[in-house]
Image: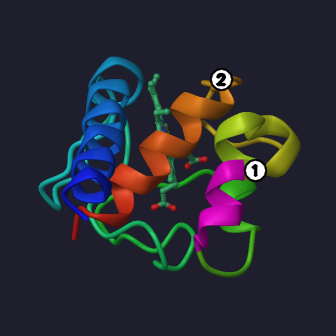
């Protein structure tokens, strides 16, 4: 049990580090979007392009639905393939980092 907990928090640590390195320059986690990107706290299970304080691209607004972990995975891996015309130009091909970041985001309400 203790081992499982330790393994879980180690993974969360990897996600947090990867988030800082890959995402934090454009995305805050405090509910306030910046000109560089929408705030990402609570993004898992949020409607796509739903924040009132960020001017989303028509490309992302055209996507319907919710940011499930699977949708996030598809977007982060190939932004323009998932939402042609999106203003996010930042693909994260590393499967391990991408999944760790999604796990980390699940924990940030
Ligand atoms: C260079 C700046 C930049 C970086 C780095 C970046 N993004 Fe983005 N991201 C954006 C912009 C701009 C948008 C808005 C896209 C649009 O309107 O089409 C966005 C949108 C998003 C959205 C959609 C949010 C919503 O409210 O629907 C998610 C999720 C997201 N980014 C996650 C990430 C993650 C996770 C990372 C790190 C792997 C990351 N982004 C790295 C600029 C960036």
Q: Which residues are magenta?
A: 67-73
CA separation in Å, label 2 and label 1: 12 Å
- Binning the other alpha carbons within 10 Å of mark 1 as few (below 14), some (14 to 19) or many (20 upward) gives some
SS at mark 1 in the image: helix
Viewer-proximal residue among 87 and 28: 28
Side of 35 where 63 appears, left or right: right
**Residue that carries the numbered disc 1 in the rendered image:** 74
**Residue to which mark 2 is pinned:** 94
Please give the name of the residue rendered at 37% of the width and 70% of the height, measured from the top-left corner: 51
* SS of the residue under disc 2: loop
Question: Please, which residue is most extreme toward the top here?
Answer: 21
Residue 79 occupies quadrant: top right
Up the image or down, 38 lies above or below 101; here it is: below
Residue under the point 61% across and 79% down? 66
In this view, the mark in front (2 or 1): 2
User: Neighbour class for label 2 at 10 Å: few (<14), some, many (≥20)?
Assistant: few
Q: Position of residue 106 (x, y in %)?
A: 37, 65
Rendered image quadrant of residue 17: top left
- Per the image, is 14 magenta? no
Residue at mark 2: C-beta within 8 A of ligand 1: no
């Amino acid at each position: 049990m203790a081992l499982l907990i330790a393994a879980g928090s180690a993974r969360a640590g990897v996600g947090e580090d990867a988030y800082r390195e890959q995402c934090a320059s454009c995305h805050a986690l405090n509910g306030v979007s910046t000109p560089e990107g929408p705030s990402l706290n609570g993004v898992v299970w949020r409607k796509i392009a739903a924040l009132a304080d960020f001017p989303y691209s028509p490309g992302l607004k055209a996507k319907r639905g919710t940011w499930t972990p699977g949708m996030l995975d598809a977007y982060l891996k190939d932004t323009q393939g998932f939402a042609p015309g999106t203003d996010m130009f930042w693909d994260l091909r590393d499967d391990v980092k991408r999944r760790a970041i999604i796990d980390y985001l699940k924990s940030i309400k």
